[in-house]
Image: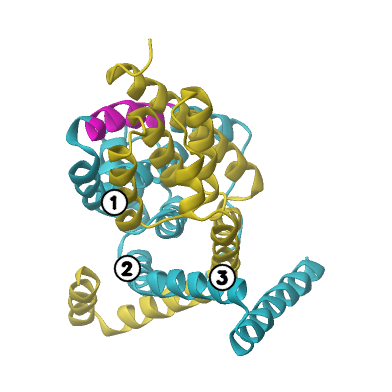
Amino acid sequence: MKRNVIIKSTGIVFYLVFLSISFKFDFAPGKEIGTTFFYFLIDMLKILPFSFILIGLFEVWIKRSTVEKHLGDKSGVKGYFWAILLAGTTIGGLFVSLPIAYSLCRKGAKLSIVFTYLGASAIARIPMTVFEASFVGLKFTIIRLSISLPLVILTSIALGNYLTKNSYSIQMPDKLK
Amino acid sequence: MITGLTLLVSLLASRGKTLKALKIAFRKFVDISPAFLTMLILVSIVLFFFPDKAFLSYLGKDNQMKNVLFASFFGSITLAPGFIAFPLCGILLKKGVSYMVLSAFTTTLMMVGILTYPIEKEYFGLKVTVIRNIISFCIALVVALMTGIFFGEIF
């Protein structure tokens, strides 16, 4: 584990050194990579701090029993409905929904519902869907959603059941507990 | 904006709890930031080697199946915010790229995250990440196929 960390940090340092040398000596590919890096970095910094604050508030205020009731083992069909609704209002991309999904999981949401949330947040975010429909056409969007959403739900149930049977548990111990 | 409002309400309700929430937020952010950094580095390198333009030029009209596979592969390895991806799709559409190919591209782009892999692995572990991405890839292919059928592009 420790060796991994060393390799990773060396890689990151090497990358940053490469970028700064590229910028200093006008090395075009390096500059292009650097520009993309900063572009995406800024794009994420615009969203991430807010989403993490929301996650923090969620962890403090929402009781475990509430999550269990609406998204847990006994939530039934409604749980999937909530998961998709929640996904629709998520912004960003997988990099935002992953930490949210993780928090939901730790608060006792059912695995299949968490995976439904993950999938749905990728394909059915409301602002993005509107955007898509205006560029590619409403028919395209409707077909895409009406086929992919049921598939997401079905595969999430399958994956959730499979993992529950194999007594999968979420990793990364929460250091705050 | 929503974050600001909730934060304010929370602050009014309880100062201690809000402070704790912020602490949690900060800790979680710091804990996952190496994974984010890794992802950003991967993104910048991958996009350098596979720029959008190359993608455009590879999409011929000759072989639909090949195009679908290529588009889904490209969608899987890249990462693009919606405000770039969809205008790009609009352009592709005007250039005569089929709906089926577009659907393969957008769905994999959104659902399959090879570049978000460092983050996903951190939260859900290697096995689940791999399974979920493979499933997502298959879903994308099915969706593409169905799109093709509905738009009368195949069969």
Disc 1 residue type?
Pro
Q: Position of residue B70 (x, y in %)?
A: 53, 35
First of labels 2, 3 by sequence position: 3
Residue located beneath label 2 in the image: A54
Q: Chain of mark 1?
A: B
Disc 3 residue type?
Ile
Q: Which residues are magenta?
A: A140-154
Tell me which residue sits at (72%, 78%) in the image: A14
A14 lies above or below A70:
below
Chain identity for the colour yellow used in the image: B
Q: Give the numbered dot on residue B87.
A: 1
Q: Position of residue B151 (x, y in %)?
A: 28, 21
Helix, strand or loop status at disc 1: helix
Quarter of the N terminus of chain A within the rendering: bottom right
Helix, strand or loop status at disc 2: helix
Q: Judge left or right: residue B122 versus residue B100.
A: right
